[in-house]
Amino acid sequence: MEYTGNDLYCDVIMKGEIPLKKEFESENVLAYHHTRPYCPVHIVVVPKKHIASFTALTKDDEPLLLEIVEVLKIMASKVEKEHGAARILTNLGTYQDNKHLHFHVVSGDPLPNRASH
């Protein structure tokens, strides 16, 4: 699927438009294996509520952020245990292709021929 909008999560992912290999899902947070992974292990953790980016979080978002951090901890722990290492990243500004807060839990060297996400 070729997506040309700026919020893949609200427009496609949360609507169930494409199949996902889910690792975790609650009422507020979704964690799934990236559909176009940058690294051999690449899990995306995203709030179901639209928040434009990390810097757009507000005081009202603190409970959601705590839940996201807990999911990141679980995903990173699992990846680290299975693969020996993990990174947690988020992007801002022009580095952020999709204008919806999301985090990447990755392990391994970048796959050949992959642009950053």
Image (cartoon, helix red, strand yellow):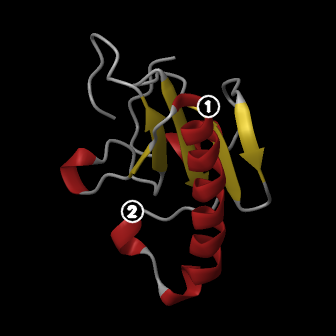
In the image, residue 63 sits, relative to residue 81, either above or below, namely: below
- Quadrant position of residue 17: top right
Disc ID at residue 53 = 2
Question: Mark 2 is on which residue type?
Answer: Ser
Q: Distance between the Cα atoms at labels 1 and 2? A: 29 Å
How packed mark 1 is, by other alpha carbons closer than 10 Å (few <14, some 14-19, many 20 or more), is few
Quadrant including the C terminus: top left
Q: Secondary structure at mark 2?
A: loop
N-terminal of the two: label 1 or label 2? 2
Q: At 46% from the left edge and 41% from the top edge, which residue is drawn? A: 86
Instruction: Describe the element under mark 1 as helix, strand or loop.
Output: helix
Q: Nearer the viewer, residue 92 or 49?
A: 92
Residue bearing the label numbered 1: 82
Give coordinates of residue 13: x percent, y percent: 62, 38
Q: Counting other residues with Cα less than 10 Å from the Cα at mark 2, is it few (<14), some (14-19), or many (20 or more)? A: some
Front of the two marks 1 and 2 = 1
Kindly identify the residue that appears in the image at 45 percent across and 76 percent down.
57
Q: What's under tag 1, amino acid-wise?
A: Glu
Residue ranking furthest to the left:
94
Name the residue: 60% across, 57% down.
Answer: 73
Q: Position of residue 51 (x, y in %)?
A: 49, 65
For this rendering, which residue is in front, 74 or 103?
A: 74
Identified at 58% across, 55% down, the residue is: 72
55 lies left or right of 45? left
